[in-house]
């Protein structure tokens, strides 16, 4: 069996095609062995894993060393094929650090519902009892996040809850990781608590369309306050900017209490992130008070060259 196997690519594609697991170009998977690690390239989509060359081969030991200062942290210098122009994922360093053959990082909605609030994180720890799990506080993706993981990681760790970010599952085989993801998702599953609301019957402003799946973010006072009150995970900031705007001229915005608008020119990534915030907030129980990552963390993401590169690639779709 080749390292970049059909089973691995199929798992990647399945995760990338499920908006409750991965949204747009978010998330990444890797598989390593015999001194090589294949990892999703920055700006590509896991959903295309079976149809396009979205993976890039890197030297995992060199990538691990970049997490501790031996390089700039981008892992571009660890790419094995000099003809390959793809950039490794910005999270290559933590994939290299986790000493399992297969690693899958998703922006699981069920995980995010728990991971954005202290109450949710406490409940998640109870639900995941018995699994080899660690919880890692929010850090900027890339080397800062890898360093935070390194402080808590043990050889037995196979589940990582990234607070205000997502889920990592690791194992010896593709099947083991697939089964582990299913187990975590089952334990953390949350019902939709805010029923869907129809999009307004009135015509949307010129250049926009109503996004029915997110109408409740405008019409429900609590969800509206949360949606406008901050950003709860990195990819929201990268593709939509801080929180949700209320003025036209943006890819998405909330139009009063009527509904959510999606610009005709919005990218598929921006549409996916609007749906994601609706999926997360409509599952958030009363009494769970989400903590935004804050203006300083937002500014770090917005002014980061690695994320500007990913935005530029996503803008093509």
Image (tube, grey):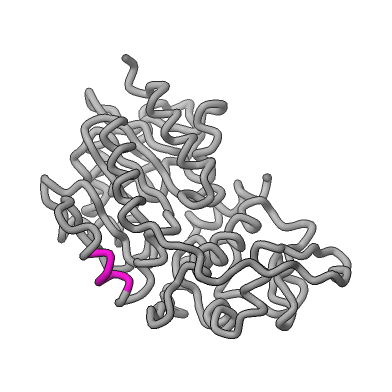
Res 96 visible: yes
Quadrant in which the C terminus is drawn:
top right
Quadrant in which the N terminus is drawn:
top left
In the image, what residue occupies the spot 53% across and 64% down? 236
Q: Quadrant of residue 114?
A: bottom left
In the image, what residue occupies the spot 55% across and 57% down? 308
In the image, what residue occupies the spot 22% across and 23% down? 34
* Left or right for 186, reference 53: left
Hey, which residue is sitting farthest top in the picture?
1
Image location of residue 87, percent across then percent down? 46, 40
Q: In the image, is residue 296 above or below residue 210?
A: below
In the image, what residue occupies the spot 36% across and 51% down? 185
Res 303 visible: no
Residue 131 lies within the magenta run? no
Image location of residue 47, percent across then percent down? 53, 38
Hey, which residue is sitting farthest left in the picture?
155
Q: Quadrant of residue 78?
A: top left
Q: In the image, is residue 151 above or below residue 231?
A: above
Image location of residue 77, percent across then percent down? 36, 39
Q: Which span of residues is magenta-colored? A: 120-125
Q: How many marks?
A: 0
* Left or right for 202, reference 94: right
Front-most of residues 137 and 312? 137
The prevailing secondary structure element of the residues shown in magenta is: helix
* Left or right for 2, reference 242: left
Image location of residue 214, percent across then percent down? 64, 66
């Amino acid at each position: 069996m080749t390292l970049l196997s059909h089973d691995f690519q199929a798992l990647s594609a399945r995760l990338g095609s499920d908006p409750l697991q991965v949204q747009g170009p978010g998330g990444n998977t890797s598989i390593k062995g015999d001194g090589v690690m294949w990892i999703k390239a920055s700006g590509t989509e896991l959903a295309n894993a079976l149809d396009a060359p979205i993976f890039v081969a890197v030297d995992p030991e060199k990538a691990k060393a970049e997490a501790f200062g031996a390089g700039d942290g981008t892992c571009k210098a660890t790419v094995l094929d000099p003809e390959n122009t793809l950039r490794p994922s910005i999270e290559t360093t933590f994939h290299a650090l986790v000493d399992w053959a297969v690693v899958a990082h998703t922006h699981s909605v069920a995980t995010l519902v728990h991971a954005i609030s202290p109450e949710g994180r406490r409940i998640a720890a109870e639900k995941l009892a018995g699994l080899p799990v660690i919880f890692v506080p929010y850090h900027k993706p890339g080397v800062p996040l890898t360093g935070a993981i390194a402080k808590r990681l043990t050889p037995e760790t196979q589940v990582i809850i990234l607070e205000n970010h997502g889920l990592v599952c690791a194992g010896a085989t593709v099947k083991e990781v697939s089964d582990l993801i299913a187990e975590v998702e089952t334990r953390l599953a949350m019902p939709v608590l805010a029923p869907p609301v129809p999009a307004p019957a009135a015509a949307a402003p010129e250049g926009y369309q109503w996004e029915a799946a997110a109408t409740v973010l405008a019409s429900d006072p609590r969800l509206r306050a949360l949606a406008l009150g901050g950003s709860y995970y990195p990819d929201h900031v990268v593709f939509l900017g801080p929180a949700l705007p209320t003025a036209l001229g943006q890819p998405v915005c909330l139009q009063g209490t009527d509904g959510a608008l999606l610009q005709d020119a919005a990218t598929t990534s921006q549409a996916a992130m609007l749906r994601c915030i609706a999926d997360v907030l409509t599952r958030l129980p009363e009494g769970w008070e989400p903590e935004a990552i804050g203006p300083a963390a937002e500014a770090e993401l917005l002014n980061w060259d690695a994320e500007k590169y990913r935005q530029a690639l996503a803008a093509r779709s």
